[in-house]
Image (tube, rainbow, N blue to C red):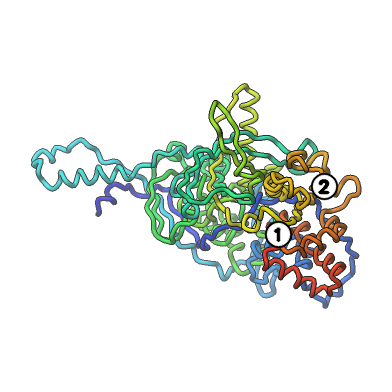
Amino acid sequence: MSTVEQLIGAPADYASEEETFTPSIAPSLTYSEDSEDQDEPRPEETPRRRRASTRLIAKSAADVQRITGESTQELLNRCCGGGCCMKLQKQDGLEYEHVTLPDNKAFRSLELKIDEIPTVLTKIPELPEQITFLQSIRRVSSTPSPTDSAISVSSPVSSLSSAIEAKLKDLSVEDLDTSIQPPSYVQPHPPHHVFPARIHNTRELTRPGAEKRTYHFDLDITDYPHEEGVDFKVGGAIGITAPNDAASVDQILDLLLVPRYLRDKPVLLRTTRGRWPTVWGEDEAREIVTTRRDLLTWCSDIQSYPPNKPLLRVLAEHALDPNEKKILMFLCAGEGQGVFCDFRTGPYISLAQLLSAFPSSKPPLDLLLSVLQQLMPRFYSLSNDPHESYEIRDGKQHRLIEIAVTVQETPDWRDGCRTGVGSGFFERQARKYLELQRGGEKAPQLYIPMFKGLMANPLAKEFVSDGPMLLIGAGVGIAPFRGFVQHRLKNANCANKVWVLQGVRDSLIDELYNGEWGVHEEKVKKVVQSRRGESRYVQDEVFHQAELVWSIINSVDGRVFVCGSSKGMGEGVEDALIRVSQDKGNLEREEAKKFWELKREAGQYITETW
């Protein structure tokens, strides 16, 4: 047994996990998990009775959107691709048995369409390979045993003892406050490092009655490390390493029966391969001293992804109730493929919900960590000109960056709604900050763990300080354009070269940054409301401003920027731009599409949608 192995105790009874990981890649730029702050126009559909012999076929992305209610990318992310969604009916030649379903609210919330289950199941995947192991750290006593008295001071055992002590120092948790930032092994893309930026100020931008809540944050980056070599840029985006909600983490540990005294105790994490628990680290084996709470808080996503078969297979393996095991095995089997796909494409399901639905299944924590997805950073666009944002506080000049975050909510099985990982974290921090301020604390010490992120994204890369520019956005997608306008309007000669089309539902309650765009705001910004006044969408205004659009895009240095949700707004704006070029350029539709493709390649048509 090696010296290191002597320092490590046997794995705890509840420790051991794994899953088939997909390679971690840099996530695409998103400003909030789901920020659709303008209604989508819903074309009326005339119901038509279909003959039994016909099949419904999706010929385009619009058809997929109409049939499934999701964009093509959303459907690809959710669907296994097995063509199994028609297999919800009983299959001939199989013998079925009735299975008593779990009688709890969490299981009923899954809406599983299960009546009877085949007595024989096939194509059940093997238990996933375990690549993550947790082992307790056993300290070596410094008190010599009676048998050691016969050993001379110069003996090799003395040197071995020194080596053990040195190794023990390595087997301790780093001195880092993980209540405000992740452990250092949660490394973003080099050369960036996570920095806990103090919240300088925060406020809610939307008003009571708005369908979605949006918050503004001023983050203090005065002490942000300068070694990275790239400064913050207009239109750039910062990465946020948001933690899982502490209450949700404790709930999962409770459901797994992990003792409370062990949750924050140092433990040795061993991985055999993969990038986890890092974000952009190398695919390699690792040994890290950490805690169970930190791993579940900062490294594993417990609510954003639909359940996959490796996770269900692990739950099935450790289910003690025979009926729960049969249901979980059925979802993993070929016979249950249709129910499984229907299950995955239904409401978002959290890990706590699954564990509550199948209460007899309590897999080891490290095995569970092996099959959970990596908790990835979220990206949020700067909503100011970072070169000109400073404020004096406590006799010191502070450099600030600003962002806007719209809170994403999905129905929760316990009634009410739950928020997204990133936006929910921001809202919790904002509410704590405002509550402390109301209690008389002038400068609450609350932080946002961030890194410089994407300063070469399309918006930042194509922004120029001169030339005509049309900025089209809806909801929180308008936020980066505020920085554009602030930067451009410093030069009086640019006042007539920038125009903003902002889509909102109702300007009285959800118009973001009203009056905060600069001295020429009324000249450069047009607000389009979908639920008040003329009740138009921003894409309608784009076509209405065809003369302006055509003039800008045909200028030598003209640019058109579009930012916001691709669902509804982004697709609608693109269609409106195509119709503008058809009308003003006398082009056929395919020629008009090609026109905008060429403008995109030339850097004159820039979109950032999610």
Q: What SS does tag 1 mark?
A: loop
Kindly report which numbered mark, 1 or 2, lies closer to the viewer in this rendering: 2
Q: What SS does tag 2 mark?
A: strand
Left/right placement of residue 191 relative to residue 232 reads left
Q: Residues within 10 Å of mark 1 (few under 14, many from 20)?
A: few
Dot placed on the residue nearer the N-terminal end, 1 or 2: 1
* Image location of residue 298, percent across then percent down: 51, 46
Left/right placement of residue 397 relative to residue 47 reads left
Kindly identify which residue carries mark 2.
Answer: 527
Outermost residue on the front side: it is 493
Q: Nearer the viewer, residue 520 or 106?
A: 520
Q: Residue at (54%, 40%) from the top-left corner?
A: 221
Outermost residue on the bottom side: it is 53
* Image location of residue 368, percent across then percent down: 50, 53
Outermost residue on the top side: it is 440
Q: Nearer the viewer, residue 182 or 482?
A: 482
Count numbered badges in the picture: 2
Which quarter of the figure has residue 305?
A: bottom right
Kindly identify which residue carries mark 1.
Answer: 113
Q: Nearer the viewer, residue 176 or 48?
A: 176
Q: Residue at (13%, 40%) from the top-left corner?
A: 148
Residue 351 visible in image: no
Image quadrant occupied by the N terminus:
bottom left
Residue 20 visible in image: yes
Image quadrant occupied by the C terminus:
bottom right
* Image location of residue 471, percent across then percent down: 75, 54
Tell me the kind of residue under disc 1. Lys
The circle on residue 89 is: none
